[in-house]
Image (spheres, coloured by chain):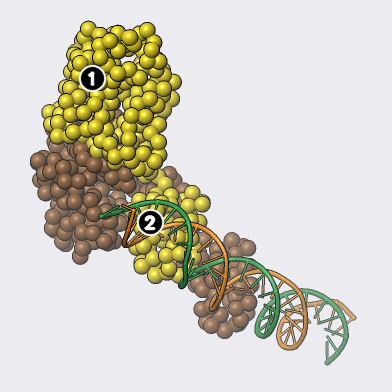
Chain colours: A yellow, B brown, C orange, D green
DNA sequence: GAAATTCCTGCATAAAAACGCAGAAACCGG
DNA sequence: CCGGTTTCTGCGTTTTTATGCAGGAATTTC
């Protein structure tokens, strides 16, 4: 079989099945693995396939694209995410809600981190999927198109089965008196379950949302362990929360 | 044999078989390899063949295997999706696997359709989410980064709880003898569960994948009800499947 | 962490191509 | 018919290309 022929065959297979294994190719075509690898390399150089360990993938079915710009207060959120990430260690089970702050967190996870992330938020899961080393567990149930998150009794039941090391809550409103509050009943149910299922609860919030209130209560301050904002922990705005027993970062 | 004659013969062979080997040509015509090579060179210069190491290929060869459009065989897939959509009625529960064909289906769903769609494939769910009227149920579990689908025992258990009206399987390989086959063990487990949980199983496959085989078996032809390809139902390729008792569309 | 794959690099070998050359054949104008 | 010219073909030689193999590095997986 001619080299060009072989490459055409490979390309054909990749486009047909979205992936190929070098091992199966080399038995199919009956050449050495080296040859296959060289072919894959060439095709990859031409951009016709994407080479991965053990085989190759179709370039079309690979990246699910999600826009990143235009996020409100992105710099603050990055700062928050950075602090939050420092709390995650290898091997941990991490439960996260949805929201743009959590998406930033997902994007900034260091590549070598190995941990398990659990979430029901589609945009967040998309980010997790791009990460090379983490395990991703998706909470399933009915999807709320508004919040792009799975909601419902089954999702809650699933969360309750988990015992996570740490839980990051993207927060819509936090206040000394009313604790954490939100405006979507179903999302609140989920967050409650997440709080119950975690050893440590970390609340991520930009300073703007501190000392604001929303209609539905998630939990009181006593149920959360830590508050992260883009501000310094010794900022005046934070002192009331320190006094309330929260660790502020 | 004259030079022109020889070249005409070569050209004929190339067009007939899509390829020639210089070595076989030189024994057939009984001239030296150099002569053959010079002939091939001339023909290649005229653009009548494509010269490669060891022989030559038909110029049409390239176009067959190197599609220039973005997603592979998108038109065929749209045609398939169109046919599949005609099977979906208001109020139905629809179970779908992953794959680019299913994504096309998701994109083309009519806006006024009201039905419930269930899937564990992230890219497919993303498309469903854009639809104004359908309910979307996400199957949760561990995410396979390769196939961008939730896999695992919990996902399978969840699927088994469902009783769907119809199930659409994006198919990697289908064959009269071996039925539906695939190359990812976990995906196969899911598909098996989906087949069990559906009243009607519809297999979507582009014609290229018909009569091909992959290593792992999903089910036999007797387990599926319908086969949809981009071809007409009375196409010769389909007749064997009609005879096997499938409804072909 | 250890075992098993897979990958990469350099090397050896064989096949094919390129090159130059020379003899043979065809062509051609007288 | 003939010398000169052009074209074609085959033969060595050198270069390039294709492929497989052996090792050690890197990676995945358990």
The quarter of the picture where residue B218 lies is bottom left
**Residue A187 vertical position relative to residue A8 in the rendered view, above or below:** above
Decide if residue A175 is on the left or right side of residue A30. Answer: left
For disc 1, the chain is A
For disc 2, the chain is A
Q: Which residue is mark 1?
A: A224
Residue at (26% x, 42% y) in the render: B143
Decide if residue A128 is on the left or right side of residue A216. Answer: right
Query: Element under label 2?
Result: loop
Residue at (24% x, 42% y) in the render: B142
Q: Nearer the viewer, mark 2 or mark 1?
A: 1
Task: Determine crowd level at label 1: few under 14, some 14-19, many 20+ residues with C-alpha closer than 10 A.
Answer: many
**Residue A144 vertical position relative to residue A112 in the rendered view, above or below:** above
Q: Which residue is mark 2?
A: A54
Residue at (30% x, 18% y) in the render: A247
**Residue A197 vertical position relative to residue A28 in the rendered view, above or below:** above
Instruction: State the residue in front, A166 or A150.
Output: A166
Image position, residue B43 (x, y; %):
60, 67
Query: Element under label 1?
Result: loop
**Residue A165 vertical position relative to residue B151 in the rendered view, above or below:** above
Q: Is residue A96 visible?
A: yes
Q: Is residue B203 visible?
A: no
Q: CA distance from mark 2 to mark 1?
A: 45 Å
Between discs 2 and 1, the one toward the N terminus? 2
């Amino acid at each position: 079989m001619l080299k060009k022929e072989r490459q055409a065959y490979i390309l054909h297979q990749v486009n047909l099945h979205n992936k190929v294994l070098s091992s199966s190719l080399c038995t199919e075509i009956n050449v050495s693995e080296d040859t296959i690898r060289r072919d894959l390399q060439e095709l990859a150089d031409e951009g016709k396939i994407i080479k991965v360990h053990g085989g190759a993938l179709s370039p079309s079915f690979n990246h699910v694209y999600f826009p990143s710009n235009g996020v409100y207060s992105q710099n603050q959120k990055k700062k928050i995410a950075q602090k939050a990430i420092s709390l995650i260690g290898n091997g941990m089970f991490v439960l996260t809600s949805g929201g743009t702050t959590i998406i930033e967190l997902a994007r900034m996870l260091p590549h070598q981190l190995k941990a398990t992330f659990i979430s029901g938020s589609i945009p967040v899961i998309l980010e997790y999927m791009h990460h090379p080393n983490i395990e991703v567990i998706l909470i399933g149930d009915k999807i709320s198109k508004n919040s792009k998150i799975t909601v419902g009794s089954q999702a809650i039941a699933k969360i309750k089965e988990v015992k996570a090391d740490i839980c990051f809550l993207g927060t819509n409103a936090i206040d000394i008196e009313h604790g954490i509050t939100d405006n979507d009943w179903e999302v609140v149910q989920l967050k409650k379950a997440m709080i119950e299922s975690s050893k440590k609860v970390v609340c991520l919030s930009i300073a703007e949302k501190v000392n604001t209130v929303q209609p539905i209560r998630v939990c009181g301050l006593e149920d959360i362990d830590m508050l992260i904002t883009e501000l310094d922990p010794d900022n005046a705005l934070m002192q009331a929360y320190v006094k309330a027993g929260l660790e502020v970062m």
